[in-house]
Image (tube, rainbow, N blue to C red):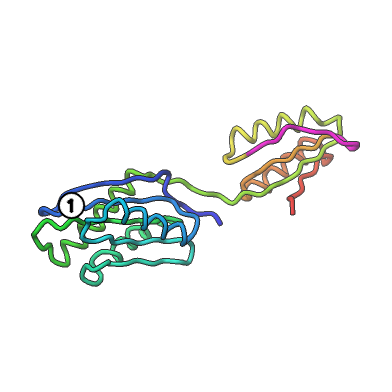
Amino acid sequence: MAHRTVRAAASHEEVVSGSRFIGYVVEVDDVEAAAIHLAGVRAAHPAATHHCWAHRVGPAQRFSDDGEPGGTAGRPMLEVILKRDLDHVSAVVVRYFGGRKLGAGGLVRAYSGTLAKALDAAGVRDVVDVAGVTVRAPFAHTDTVLRLLADAAEKTAPFDLSAPTFDAGGLVVRLSVPEEALAVLSAALREATNGAASLEVDV
């Protein structure tokens, strides 16, 4: 399913009133991967006072304050993810207590702020739905179709084009195309070949 997620794994650290906050974000495929991410951060920071987390993977939206006062860590972190309309994201912010209490408002700002800066460092990318398709065309239209597909590949991402093959009917090319581009590509093929080329979505 099409969605927006982080471009790369990233982290950010800052000190607030003596406490160290270190935020980690990563793209995950499923809830199990989010759990593995959390376990990895816990293992890297066994002495941290808290390991607060939040993740969104499709309809699964979960969070934990991990011992901080209710509503001061995990929920604000999830809100940052939701406000940025990110999906398939796991976020963990660890805290090393520095001796001074921050109060509820201070904790919310520290956790959400640290995560926001980690997300800034990670960047964003759009994940699109891709369909596998097969293009067929008579031998006479080989050059026209290959030029059209090469031009489309340069303008559309992701667009994976296989090496052309031939069968008794002519040219056969298998490719992966963003679903939103299928109608335009199909119409362009029909127009360029006077209806001789066909585009079939692989089952």
Residue that sits furthest to the right in the current view: 168
Residue at 57% in and 40% down: 157
Instruction: Write the residue at 52% across / 49% down.
Output: 127
Q: Residue 54: horizontal and vertical position, in percent?
A: 35, 62
Q: Is residue 54 magenta?
A: no
Residue located beneath label 1 in the image: 20
Q: Residue furthest left?
A: 100
Question: Percent x, y for residue 74?
Answer: 30, 64
Looking at the image, is 46 positioned above or below residue 12? below
Q: Residue furthest bottom?
A: 70
Check if residue 169 falls in the magenta segment.
yes
Q: Secondary structure at mark 1?
A: strand
Taking the spot 41% from the left edge, 60% from the top edge, the residue there is: 35
Q: Residue at x 39, y 61 (%)?
A: 55
Quick one: 26 or 38, which is closer to the camera?
A: 38
- Quadrant of the rendered image containing residue 42: bottom left
| Circle 1: residue type | Arg
Query: Split into 4 quadrants, where in the image is the C terminus?
Result: bottom right
Residues packed near mark 1 inside 10 Å, few (<14), some (14 to 19) or many (20 plus): some
On the picture, is 115 further left or further right than 62?
Answer: left
The magenta stretch spans which residues?
160-170
Place of residue 101 in the rendered image (x, y in percent of width and height, measured from the top left)? 10, 63
> Nearest the camera: 72 or 145?
72
Front-lying residue, 159 or 33: 33
Q: Name the image quarter holding residue 187.
A: top right
Q: Is residue 30 left or right of residue 108?
A: right
In the rendered view, does 195 fall on the left or right side of 17?
right
Figure quadrant of residue 82: bottom left
Q: Position of residue 85 (x, y in %)?
A: 41, 57
Q: Is residue 114 above or below residue 195?
A: below
Q: Is residue 158 above or below residue 139?
A: below
